[in-house]
């Protein structure tokens, strides 16, 4: 298929493009490079031996987007582009709504005009808020989000489903990611956060390489087996393969569908620290700190719908994720 990837040079998109190219799909990538760099285009080619068509475009820029895509036959768009820093979204809500929601609306207009009515969207488990139950199935009700970033995901989901409801030509797949970590086994691509990492694994790898002194564990008084927060960490390569499988739903004219992409296993912060130490033979000094505002105790998926309908399930273990995250950090 000819697949348009927005946010193409980002963390999850770059891994997805590798898997798509290895499955013989043809990629047109766009990104405004606000949170990634152009060298990723060559790094992907280094892994797959195939160079994608790439354009530096902001999805909010209707004229530029239209001129790049006019006359192209796009079978499906996988829409990753967006700003994703939770704390920054609290400080700059209008920027987040403009970029994520405004950008999506402009993208949808152009897709409609060029006759592409298939979209797969990067959503997040954040739309479940404090989940009504765990493991979280897709039927779990959406709840109040704790920050503007989360609201952009929740609102974009609604916009896409409303659009599909109004026009049955569209197929919309919402993929709710749990906590992607890890990196490509080659160590050529991975996650490169700007500044002080917000998320757990990038922080751990920066402690491991001596860039940061110690990890702050945000709270050990949650109602969890060891008191620290429990999450469903998923290897980014497994997540990437979930997108390849989601194309099956698009090809089967699925209408509007939602899938959780997680492993179904919950691990605590201390499970991750101990596994990282054991697999990589490196000590991670840590200190228990107060809870982080907006955090929840426990969040993990019931991924059985994706297995049943898409034939997808996560294969990599927490050990693999810790090993590959550290391999990438060392090489970069
Ligand atoms: P990322 O920041 O590495 O990738 C996003 C890419 O989008 C970046 O390369 C950025 O430059 C680009 N971008 C942002 N605004 C743009 C615009 N207006 N026009 C064109 N390009 C633009 O993030 P990621 O971790 O790869 O996340 C990809 C998607 O998955 C995002 O939508 C994110 O919200 C979602 N998601 C991520 C996680 C996670 O933990 N990483 C979890 C759930 C959902
Ligand atoms: C965070 C975002 C969520 C987003 C997701 C993926 C918040 C409140 N939530 O989820 O909206 O979809 O990232 O980008 O930011 N932890 C520490 N020390 C650290 C970092 C994290 O103890 O330095 C703990 C957290 O308290 C949590 C776990 O590690 O229990 C995972 O944190 P993180 O990687 O930030 O992901 P989430 O909070 O699940």
Image (spheres, helix red, strand yellow):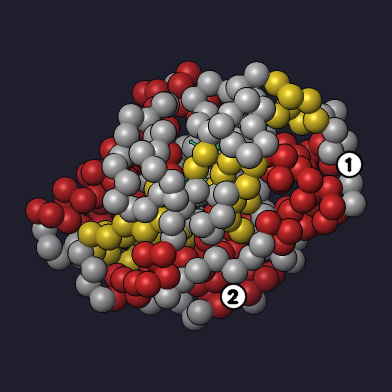
In this view, the residue farthest toward the left is: 166
Q: Is residue 140 left or right of residue 39?
A: left
Q: To which quarter of the image does residue 19 belong?
A: bottom right
State the residue in front, 140 or 115: 140
Is residue 330 visible from the viewing direction of this image? no
Instruction: Locate the N terminus by quadrant.
Output: bottom left
Image coordinates of residue 112 in percent, x first then y, are: 20, 58
- What is the tally of numbered marks visible in this picture? 2
Picture residue at 29% right of the left edge, 76% below the top: 251
Q: Secondary structure at mark 1?
A: loop
Q: Is residue 42 left or right of residue 255?
A: right
Q: To which quarter of the image does residue 310 belong?
A: bottom left
Image coordinates of residue 315 in percent, x first then y, are: 59, 69
Picture residue at 60% right of the left edge, 22% below the top: 291
Image coordinates of residue 157 in percent, x first then y, are: 29, 46
Q: Is residue 76 left or right of residue 234?
A: left
Mark 1 Cβ inside 8 Å of ligand 2: no
Badge 1 is on which residue?
283
Number of residues whose C-alpha sits closer than 10 Å to that of mark 1, classed few (under 14), some (14–19) or many (20 or more): few
Q: Secondary structure at mark 2?
A: loop
Q: Which mark is residue 50?
A: 2
Q: Is residue 62 left or right of residue 24?
A: left
State the residue in front, 220 or 259: 220
Q: Which mark is residue 14?
A: none
Image coordinates of residue 123 in percent, x first then y, are: 40, 48
Number of residues whose C-alpha sits closer than 10 Å to that of mark 2, classed few (under 14), some (14–19) or many (20 or more): some
Mark 1–mark 2 distance (CA, rounded to whole Å): 39 Å
Is residue 236 visible from the viewing direction of this image? yes
Dot in front, 1 or 2: 1
Image height of 176 relative to 24, above or below: above
């Amino acid at each position: 298929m000819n697949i348009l990837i927005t946010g193409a040079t980002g963390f999850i998109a770059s891994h997805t493009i590798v898997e798509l190219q290895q499955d013989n799909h043809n990629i047109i990538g766009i990104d405004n490079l606000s949170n990634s760099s152009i060298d990723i285009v060559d790094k992907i080619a280094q892994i797959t031996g195939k160079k994608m068509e790439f354009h530096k475009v902001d999805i909010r820029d209707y004229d530029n987007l239209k001129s790049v895509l006019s006359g192209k036959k796009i079978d499906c768009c996988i829409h990753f582009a967006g700003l994703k820093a939770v704390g920054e979204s609290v400080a700059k809500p209008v920027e987040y709504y403009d970029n994520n929601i405004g950008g999506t609306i402009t993208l949808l207009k152009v897709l409609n005009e060029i006759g592409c009515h298939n979209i797969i969207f990067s959503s997040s488990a954040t739309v479940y808020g404090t989940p009504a139950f765990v493991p979280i199935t897709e039927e779990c009700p959406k709840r109040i989000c704790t920050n503007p970033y989360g609201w952009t995901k929740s609102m974009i989901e609604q916009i896409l489903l409303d659009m599909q409801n109004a026009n049955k030509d569209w197929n919309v797949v919402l993929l709710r990611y749990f906590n992607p970590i890890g990196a490509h086994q080659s160590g050529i691509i991975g996650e490169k956060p700007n500044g002080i990492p917000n998320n757990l694994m990038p922080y751990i790898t920066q402690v491991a390489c001596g860039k940061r002194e110690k990890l702050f564990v945000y709270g050990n008084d949650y109602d969890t087996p060891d008191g620290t927060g429990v999450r469903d960490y998923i290897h980014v390569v497994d997540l990437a393969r979930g997108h390849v499988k989601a194309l099956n739903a698009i090809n089967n004219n699925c209408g509007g569908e939602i899938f959780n992409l997680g492993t179904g296993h919950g691990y605590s912060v201390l499970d991750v620290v101990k596994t990282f130490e054991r697999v990589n033979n490196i000590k991670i000094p840590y200190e228990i700190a107060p809870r982080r505002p907006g955090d929840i105790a426990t969040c993990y998926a019931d991924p059985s719908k994706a297995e049943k309908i898409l034939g997808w399930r996560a294969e990599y273990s927490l050990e693999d994720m810790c090993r590959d995250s550290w391999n990438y950090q060392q090489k970069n």
